[in-house]
Image: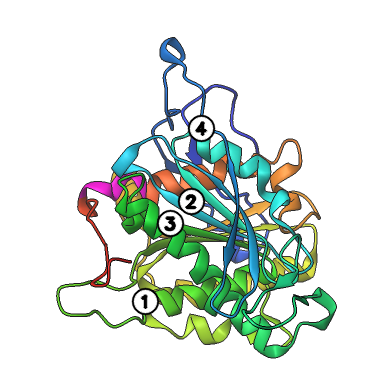
Amino acid sequence: MNPPAKTPISLWVVKLPIAVFALAILVSVASVQPAFADDEAKELPKPVEMTLPTKDGVQLKCTFFPGTNGKQTVPVMLIHGWKGRRGEFLPLAQHLQKLGHAVMIPDLRGHGESTVRKIPGRPKQDVDVEGLTSNDFAMMYGIDIETTKRYLMKQNNEGELNIELLCIVGADLGSILALNWCVQDWSWRDLPAYKQGKDVKAFVLLSPQQSFRTLRIQSALNHPIVRRDLSAMIMVGINDSKAKQNATRLHASLKRFHAPVPRDPELRRKKQKLFLVGLQTSLQGTKLLNARGLDAADRISQFIDLRVVRFQEDLPWQDRTGPRGG
């Protein structure tokens, strides 16, 4: 089901002959405007390639797309899947930047170009994806994603974005990592006169998995903030029965903790926080983003507009420089 060309953008769910997808909710959203009008078009800031060292020495290769709305800029982190790399998110990143958002994409340890560990006083080590341990998988969200967020925090303190509006997108394995990191972000204890964490407000899961190696998505779903308070969108290619089943199960797990969707369109626009999007394809993960006719990037940006951008007045920018200047 594709929207007519050049009509106001809307967020929708493909109708299917099964209960969970048949509850197709159409939520009208005002057109998402690009950062600059046509009559004052400006060149977007060029993406910045960087290396961010983690506290255990892994050299994370990342690409950062600066936003264009200053202290109102929404930051988005994109987390690839197993044996993926940051380049898979390039079309989505470019699309989001055109709307004014700032986008950070890391290659997780052992993936893409993040294959080197440097520890002072020790020989350089290779980090190979096939040799990753259970501890490495935990560090992907515990350290790697946190390292990329620290860079966004620095951008926040320079007035280039608002970290309070943070959104994270994860694909297949990345969906498990993203949710586990959301728990971590909401588990930091505040210091006197200084807020720690509690910045991510929304997540998007592309073809979410229930488990991978020693990682489980259910442990994150048990956290009350994740299952009840954060806005969520699940997207899946419905022609793959296993992927559809995983997405349906996850949606059902979250739906139990969300209030019923109001029938009134205006109330629904304000209140609905959980969305399930089924796409007529067998493609999954980041492949959903690059296929013609699926409009996956549009749907993600619509969700961000609906559940993050519209609430920025309730989440004003603030200087989050730490007590030690970090």
Position of 143 relative to 300 (above/below): below
Instruction: Categorize mark 2 by other alpha carbons within 10 Å: few (<14), some (14-19), many (20+).
Output: many
Considering the numbered disc 1 on the image, is that residue within a helix, a strand or a loop? Answer: loop
Query: Which residue is found at the position 33% from the left and 70% from the top?
Result: 198
Q: Which residue is mark 2?
A: 25
Q: Which residue is mark 1?
A: 186
Q: Is residue 312 magenta?
A: yes
Under mark 1, the amino acid is Trp
Residue 39 at x, y percent in the picture: 43, 10
Q: Which residue is mark 3?
A: 152
Quarter of the image with the C terminus is bottom left
Earlier in the chain: of badge 2 and badge 3, it is 2
Q: Which residue is mark 4?
A: 45
The answer to whether the residue labelled 2 contacts the one labelled 4, judged by CB atoms less than 8 Å apart, is no
Marking on residue 27: none
> Would residue 150 appear left or right of 88 to someone viewing this image?
left
Considering the numbered disc 4 on the image, is that residue within a helix, a strand or a loop? Answer: loop
